[in-house]
Amino acid sequence: MTSWPATSTPPDGEATAERVFTALADPTRRAILAALASGGPATATDLAVRLPITRQAIAKHLALLAEAGLVTAEPGERRRVRYRVCSAPMQVAQQFLAALARDWDGPLDALKDHLDRHALGSV
C-alpha cells in the first residue's frame, strides 16, 4: 500500500475510502452497483439478465463489493441472496474527496494569486 500525505480525514475513513475506490476502479463493479441503485435489490441471477456478464462473474464482483461495504446481502426466498446498495461507505469516500479538495484549494489559490501578481508585474 502506498503511503500518501495525510488528509484531514480520520484514518478509519481513509481505509474505508481506499476500499471504496479500489472496488469502484473496475467498470463491471460500477455497472453492477449502478444496476442495483437504479433497479433495487437483486440476486446475481437477476443482475446477469440485465448485464452482459455471467452470473458466476457477477457473484465474484458482488463479493468484492460486499467486502468494501458497498452492498449488503439479504436472505431471500428459496435460499436466494439479494443484494442491496449500502451508501454509507460512498459517503465516507465523498468526505475523503471533499477533505482532499479543501487541503488543496488553499495552496492552489495562493499559487494562482502569486502567478497572477507576477504576470501583472511583468506587463
Image (tube, rainbow, N blue to C red):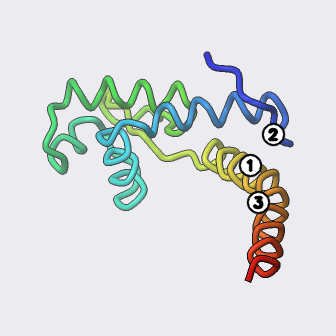
Q: CA distance from mark 1 to mark 2?
A: 6 Å
Q: Disc 3 marks which residue?
A: 108
Q: Which label is found at residue 7?
A: 2
Give SS at disc 1. Answer: helix
Give SS at disc 3. Answer: helix
Query: Which residue: 78% across, 31% down?
Result: 5
N-terminal of the two: label 3 or label 1?
A: 1
Query: In this rendering, is residue 119 above or below 100?
Result: below
Q: Disc 1 marks which residue?
A: 100
Q: Is 113 left or right of 82, judged from the image as shown? A: right
Amino acid type, residue under disc 1 in the picture = Leu
CB-based contact (under 8 Å), mark 3 and mark 2:
no
Query: Which residue: 84% across, 63% down?
Result: 110
Q: Is 103 left or right of 70, judged from the image as shown? A: right
Give SS at disc 2. Answer: loop
N-terminal of the two: label 3 or label 2?
A: 2
Q: Position of residue 101 (x, y in %)?
A: 73, 55
Q: Nearer the viewer, residue 107 or 96?
A: 107
Amino acid type, residue under disc 3 in the picture = Leu
